[in-house]
Amino acid sequence: MTHRSSLFIRNLIFTILQPGVVVGLIPYLLLRSQIERILPDSWKVTTIAGALLFLVGLVIMIACIRSFALQGKGTISPIDPTRELVSSGLYRFSRNPMYVGVMLQLIGLALYFGSNRLWLYLLLVFLAFNLFIVLIEEPRLRRDFGESYIRYCEKVGRWL
């Protein structure tokens, strides 16, 4: 197996295990008793906005996974991180566009399904993301990439 195909498979696995669980499995488990079908009977403004936000978040997430693989030569997972600091593409505007993409997907789902459970879940996910970023991810990135990461942080905000 080539390095490139191995990287693709690892990214696919980590995408299923991480954002796939956060955006797919857990929302499904929270909503399964409430929803009878995926497509609504009528399309309201919130339903359309939710679908669009979900798609925008999905595109952002895919672009980030691609950047991590091609530029960073790694995956989205902290257990198989990038070898190079990714600071181009969407990472020019946010140090955490992957998390922004996931949050947009969750906001989209909450709007689409009109679910208070999802809004509460979204809040908990955001708090967990923030704690993980501040307490684990940023210190690791400072250790791994040193001065280049510090300069990057001075130029680009954590979220937007």
Image (cartoon, rainbow, N blue to C red):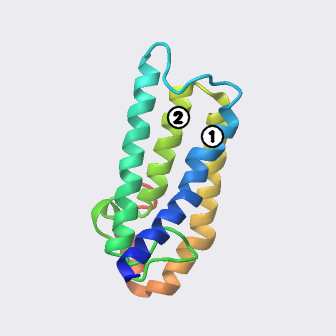
Left or right of 81? Residue 126 is: right
Could you say which disc has been placed on residue 52 in the image? none
Q: In which quadrant of the rendered view does residue 134 lie?
A: bottom right
Q: Amino acid at mark 1?
A: Pro
Q: Estimate the x, y position of residue 73 in percent, counting from the top left.
A: 38, 78
For residue 36, above or below residue 159: above
Label 2 packing within 10 angstroms: few (<14), some (14-19), many (20+): many
Vertical relation: 137 (above or below) 90: below
Question: Which of these two is toward me, 52 or 33?
Answer: 33
Q: Quadrant of the C terminus?
A: bottom left
Instruction: Name the secondary structure under disc 2.
Output: helix
Percent across and percent down for residue 105 are 48, 42
Asked if residue 120 lies left or right of residue 150, the reply is right
Give the percent coordinates (x, y) of residue 102. Answer: 49, 50
Instruction: In the displayed orientation, state which residue is furthest to the top.
Output: 42
Q: Which element carries disc 1, helix, strand or loop?
A: helix
Q: Residue at x 28, y 68 (%)?
A: 88
Residue denoted by label 1 = 27
- First along the sequence among labels 1 and 2: 1
Per the model, the C-alpha gap separating discs 1 and 2 is 8 Å
Residue occupied by mark 2: 109
Few, some or many residues within 10 Å of mark 1 (<14, 14–19, 20+): some
Residue 135 horizontal side relative to residue 77, left or right: right
Q: Residue at coordinates 49% horizontally, 71% vertically from top-left?
A: 10
Which of 125 and 135 lies nearest the eye of the viewer?
A: 125
In the image, what residue occupies the spot 53% across and 73% down? 138
* Residue 18 to residue 23: above or below: below
Kind of residue sitting beneath label 2: Leu
Residue 64 lies, with reference to residue 50, above or below; the image says: below
